[in-house]
Amino acid sequence: NAGVTQTPKFRVLKTGQSMTLLCAQDMNHEYMYWYRQDPGMGLRLIHYSVGEGTTAKGEVPDGYNVSRLKKQNFLLGLESAAPSQTSVYFCASSYYTQRHTGELFFGEGSRLTVL
Amino acid sequence: GENVEQHPSTLSVQEGDSAVIKCTYSDSASNYFPWYKQELGKRPQLIIDIRSNVGEKKDQRIAVTLNKTAKHFSLHITETQPEDSAVYFCAASMRTGANNLFFGTGTRLTVIP
């Protein structure tokens, strides 16, 4: 049981390049999320998904796209990277419940640098 | 949307002393308030949470209090140990199910042996 895994863990891009971050979870969670973490700004939600085939925007969605073709995977894409997207990206997942909010299980993070 | 403010940004305490971190939130509809701990270079992990129908919750050396009228909640760590050194994030959510958490900016706690 690996939990939530992210690939790659480190990446350096040039401005304008594209890339995809992959998140995989083996806990059969319904919900998945992508956050970015910047110094002094905490964790901010980029996009999230409440189930296979569905995605929604979070606080800071501009410049990113996501897809959830399979329940266990959640992909984050940068079509044209900008220096402002230099950050540490965390994927997370949580179980579904109608009664209350579930705990977020985070991946180890992916450090992206855009030059 | 929700706005969560967290203070202080850094906190140093002597081993064995208590540490208190405070957060305020803006939206009275928020009903779930978790705290996450992130050790250096690691992923955030949930340490305790509280829901709006509860005023206080304890788990060994950690406690969280919630004042819905004032819209603030606090994390209390007693008998601090060096392994408590980490960044702590508070968060608030006003939805059940999809966990759209709004995080505070974090508090770096250093426990001095």
Image (cartoon, rainbow, N blue to C red):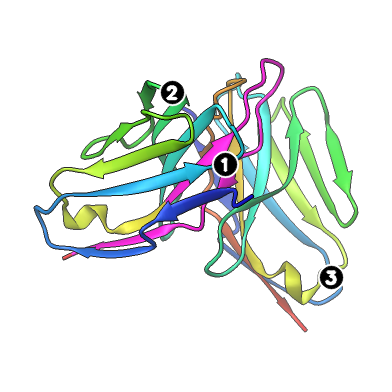
| Alpha carbon distance from label 1 to label 2 | 14 Å
Q: Splitting the image into 4 quarters, where does residue B15 fall?
A: bottom right
Kindly indicate whether the residue at mark 3 contacts the one at mark 1 (C-beta within 8 angstroms). no
Quarter holding the C terminus of chain A?
bottom left
> In the image as oriented, which residue stretches furthest toward the bottom?
B113
Label 3 sits on residue: B17
Residue A113 highlighted magenta (yes or no): yes
Counting residues from the start of the chain, the first of labels 1 and 2 encountered is 1
Residue at the (80%, 22%) spot, across then down: B53
The amino acid type found where label 1 is placed reads Asp
Residue at the (32%, 37%) spot, across then down: A60
Q: Nearer the viewer, residue A4 or B12?
A: A4
Label 1 sits on residue: A26
> In the image as oriented, which residue stretches furthest toward the left?
A16
Q: Is residue A61 left or right of residue B87?
A: left
Q: Is residue A47 left or right of residue A113?
A: right
